[in-house]
Image (spheres, rainbow, N blue to C red):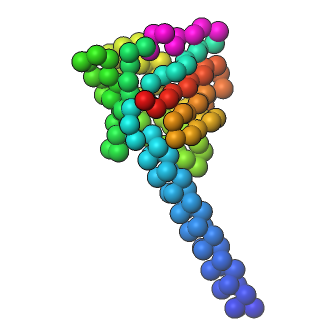
Amino acid sequence: MKNAFTLVALLCLTLAGCRKAVTELQTKTLMEIITSGQWFIDQFTEGTTTYTQDYRGYDFKFNDNGTVNAYLASAVTVGTFSVDALNKRISSRFPAGSAPLLMRLNETWTVTNASLSLVEAKPSDPARTSFLRIRAR
């Protein structure tokens, strides 16, 4: 009986360790994808309003240190981002005083589709009806 308990406890610890390793690998993979190059907003809607054109000229660079640079011509606005691969979420925050269109991106986004060159997301807050698609340059 004692051996069975030990085996079950060891199995639970192993599975928990495997689950953590898978989550860490997913986070690393998503971080590698998003930090590899620059991105642009291909589509952004809020309710029935399309704001895609407002983002023309912007490029976004996500950095390994959790910062995101929003480039428009020679101007740079620095924000932060984080990845929660387990829940398929990316949070972005630009500081107060940033351009209003960058402030619209302040959200925890649930990733609905992703590849090496595309990420589609919707707000985690169900009260907000937005859609965001970014593409790699």
Q: Residue at x 62, y 36 (%)?
A: 113
Instruction: Pick out the residue farthest to the left.
Output: 74
Left or right of 19 in this view: 31: left
Residue 80 seen anywhere in this rendered image of the structure: no
What percent of the width, then of the height, locates residue 15? 63, 70
- Residue range of the region highlighted in magenta in the rendering: 48-55
| Count of numbered labels shown in the rendering | 0
Q: Residue at x 58, y 15 (%)?
A: 45
Location of the N terminus by quadrant is bottom right
Assess whether residue 6 is covered by the magenta stretch: no
What percent of the width, then of the height, locates residue 125? 61, 28
Residue 98 seen anywhere in this rendered image of the structure: yes
Q: Nearer the viewer, residue 6 or 101?
A: 101
What percent of the width, then of the height, locates residue 31? 45, 46
Q: Is residue 85 above or below residue 135?
A: below
Q: Residue at x 47, y 18 (%)?
A: 104
Q: Quadrant of residue 4?
A: bottom right
Instruction: Pick out the residue farthest to the front.
Output: 137
Q: Nearer the viewer, residue 6 or 123?
A: 123
Q: Residue at x 60, y 45 (%)?
A: 87
What percent of the width, then of the height, locates residue 109? 55, 32
Left or right of 125 in this view: 62: left
